[in-house]
Amino acid sequence: MREKVEAALEKIRPMLVADGGNVDLVEVTDDGVVKLRLTGSCGSCPMSQMTLRMGIERLLKQEVPEVKEVIAL
């Protein structure tokens, strides 16, 4: 499942990089929890939780149905 999550993140990464940020995949647990670290300007952006929920988590759940939750570290 980690490979599928990485592939999905590659689709959203260019948008984050364009805004001066990025996302690192930290862990994918056996029960479908994806742990990410927002970096660059995304790490300190006040809208980062919205980006995480409405952008990254939504895309990951569409692309990888096994994903149950996305957590930012």
Image (cartoon, rainbow, N blue to C red):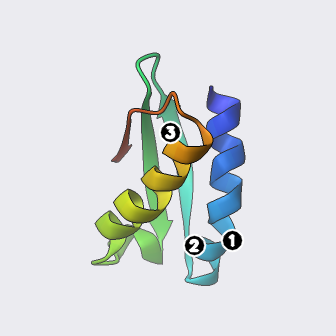
Residue found at x 66% / y 48%: 8
Instruction: Classify 34 as above or below 52.
Output: above
Discs 2, 1 touching: Cβ within 8 Å:
yes
Of the pair 15 and 58, the residue shown nearer to us: 58
Mark number displayed over residue 16: 2
Secondary structure at numbered mark 1: helix
Left or right: residue 44 versus residue 37 is left
Q: In 3D space, how far apart are the residues under numbered discs 3 and 2 (Cα atoms)?
A: 17 Å
Which kind of residue does numbered mark 3 sit on? Val
Secondary structure at numbered mark 3: strand
Residue found at x 72% / y 45%: 7
Residue linked to disc 3: 26
Mark number displayed over residue 23: none
Residue found at x 68% / y 35%: 4
For the residue carrying disc 2, how many other residues have a C-alpha within 10 Å: few (<14), some (14-19), or many (20+)? some
The percent coordinates of residue 18 (x first, y second) are: 63, 82
The percent coordinates of residue 21 (x first, y second) are: 54, 73
Residue linked to disc 1: 14
For the residue carrying disc 1, how many other residues have a C-alpha within 10 Å: few (<14), some (14-19), or many (20+)? few
Q: In 3D space, how far apart are the residues under numbered discs 2 and 1 (Cα atoms)?
A: 5 Å
Instruction: Classify 4 as above or below 22.
Output: above
Secondary structure at numbered mark 2: helix
Of the pair 25 and 67, the residue shown nearer to us: 67
Q: In 3D space, how far apart are the residues under numbered discs 1 and 3 (Cα atoms)?
A: 19 Å
The percent coordinates of residue 1 (x first, y second) are: 62, 25
Instruction: Please report whichever mark, 1 or 3, sits nearer to the chain's N-terminal start.
Output: 1
Instruction: Classify 63 as above or below 39.
Output: above
